[in-house]
Each structure stands twice: as C-alpha cells, then as structure tokens.
Amino acid sequence: MVATGVHILISLALVVLLFRSERAEPYLVTALAAAVPDIDTFVFRPLIELGYLEGALWMHRGLTHSLLAGIALTILLAAFGPWRAAAIGFGSHILLDSLSGGVRPFAPFDLALYGVSVDWLLLNMLISIIAVSVTLGGLLGMKYDFGRQVVSHPPETLSERFR
C-alpha cells in the first residue's frame, strides 16, 4: 500500500519536471488527482460494512482506480487547471498502486486485478526519496535557472582577474 502522501509527492515531482510552472494550478490539480482515488476507503468501506454495497467493484482499488474514473476526474479537474496535470496525478497513482498489489484499471467492465506486489515499505521509501530530490532540484532549477547559458570570457589583464 502506497501512502497518500507519497502519491502526492511523486505527482508533484513529475509536474515540476514536466511543467516548470510558476502558477499554483498545476500543482493543486495534480495533488488532488493523486489523492482522490483513495477516497474509496472513506466512502465505500462504510457502505460495504453496512451491507449496502458488495463486490470487487466497490472495494479498495476498484472503481476509483479505473481508467473510467481517471477520465472523469481529469475532466472535472480540468476546470481548475491543466488537464495534463490531472492526468499525471491520477496516472502516477495508478502506476504506483499497480506496483504494490494491483488495481482494476478496466472496472466496471473487467474486474480482474492487474499488477505486482513489491514490498510496500521499500517502495514508499524509494519513491519518497526520488520525489523529494526531484521536486527540490526542480524548484531550485526554476529559481536559479540552471538551464541558462552563461558565456564567460577569461580575464585579459591582471587587474581584471582580481575584480
């Protein structure tokens, strides 16, 4: 199980790398899109326990982790920011969950679980380290503009060398 904070961290890192935006919208949209798929644990679980819902479609990593939900969420969040940021947030969530047990990407049409199971603690730790490093590097790169070409000319006289 990948922690929700890790989902948000990796989506922010990807948006920093791909967008390099100084506006807040892409970061807000991607953080929401990365967190929303896990809402099934708060909404559906009580309904399952009370007997109102049953089946794999309503379980964790069911309907809210499907491509159908991803398209709907991307369209909804596109009203608040770039749709690509929403797609990155949702897609990174699905990819990480498919590495830590599997998801049902084709629900409600196919309820098969697709994915592999990697140690959750190791996965959370590695993804967090990568995400924080990339985010900090990207933010520093945006602040100091490391991509800018600096033309330097060697000093010609001794007095210019000591300036």
Image (cartoon, helix red, strand yellow):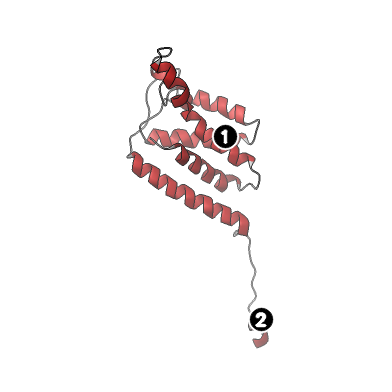
The residue singled out by tag 1 in the image is 86
Using the image, determine if residue 41 lies above or below residue 93.
Answer: above
Q: Is residue 152 left or right of residue 114?
A: right
Instruction: Give how far across and how far down residue 124 sits, in percent.
Output: 39, 42
- Residue located at (39% from left, 17% from top): 49
| Residue 86 in sight from this viewpoint | yes
The residue singled out by tag 2 in the image is 163
Kind of residue indicated by mark 1? Ala
Element type where label 1 sits in the image: helix
Sooner in the amino-acid sequence: mark 2 or mark 1: 1
Element type where label 2 sits in the image: loop
- Residue located at (43% from left, 12% from top): 52
Quadrant in which the N terminus is drawn? top left
- Residue located at (63% from left, 60% from top): 148
Quadrant in which the C terminus is drawn? bottom right
Kind of residue indicated by mark 2? Arg
Instruction: Give how far across and how far down residue 127 sits, in percent.
Output: 42, 45
**Marking on residue 119:** none
Q: Is residue 143 left or right of residue 133?
A: right
- Residue located at (56% from left, 27% from top): 73
